Image (cartoon, rainbow, N blue to C red):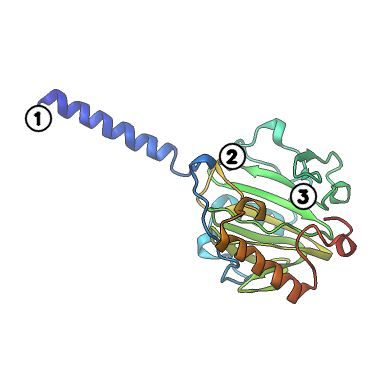
Amino acid sequence: MTKRSLVALFVAAVSCAASAQEYAHEQFAYQEPLYVPRWSTPYLPQDTMPEACRNPEVEAYIRDWEAGRIDFRTIRANNSISKDQQFCKSLDDKGNILEVKSCRYEDSPVGYIWKDLADAPVVIGITDGGMSDHEPHYHSQPECYYAVKGEGMTLADGRFVPLKKGQYFYIPGNTIHNTPIYEKGLGVLYWYPKNAHFNGFQYHWRRDVKYLTPAEEAFDKVDEVRRRDLNIGPYGTNQTVFGKK
């Protein structure tokens, strides 16, 4: 091999390594296959942060929250969230994102709101919700919760159990999760460990897995356990319980 060929090979290797480092956490939605999910995480809420959830920026948010230095209104996003996206968000009845100018979950069509706090180096956000149902879904990225207020019922280890203020919860990737909120309300700091750039995520709902029979069966199992443990039907059929979807 000539000296010129060796130099070219070295430059190409360095370029590839740089590109791999730059995009280490990115997974664009169109590149992502449709996986068959677990119907429940095998983990339960716990009082200490799971090792898989460790992240210094998240831990700093939690310290400030516990010390009373921040709350839902005053918590601030890092520089990866553009100024025009730093507002309280929710969904309309068709699943479209909208701004809730009052930053009150009572003014949300679905009963909960959220703020984006970081898109890199890790995606982080925070929710605040009143009594409301939530649609079961999954994505390939693992997700972590820290309950900052209230209490909800979350699908864990094959059943619905309380997720209480001060508890952590780990959801592996490609695992259906679901956390209906009852009278006490629930606020959650959530993050996706080692995953940046939310626009590269792909959320999967029941409607996305039509004819993928094992995935449909996983959603059916979640509905069965919702009936068994919470005495509620599939998402979208419980307006008399929650007053919203």
In the structure shown, which secondary structural element does the residue marked by tag 3 occupy? loop
**Quarter that holds the C terminus:** bottom right
Give the residue at x 61% y 65%: 217
Q: Are marks 3 and 2 in contact (CB under 8 Å)?
A: no
Give the residue at x 76% y 60%: 235
Q: Can I make out residue 167 in this image? A: no
Q: Nearer the viewer, residue 23 or 203?
A: 203
**Quarter that holds the N terminus:** top left
- From the image, tell me which residue sits under label 2: 199
What type is the residue that disc 1 sits on? Met
Give neighbour class at mark 3: few <14, some 14-19, many 20+ (Cα, 10 Å).
Answer: some
Q: Earlier in the sequence, mark 3 or mark 2?
A: 3
Select label 3 or label 2 by which is in front.
2
Select label 1 or label 3 by which is in front.
1
Residue 1 has which mark? 1
In the structure shown, which secondary structural element does the residue marked by tag 1 occupy? loop
How far apart, in angstroms, are the residues tagged by discs 1 and 2? 43 Å
- From the image, tell me which residue sits under label 3: 72
Give the residue at x 75% y 41%: 96
Image coordinates for residue 90, horizontal then vertical, percent = 77, 45
Q: Are marks 1 and 2 in contact (CB under 8 Å)?
A: no
What type is the residue that disc 3 sits on? Phe
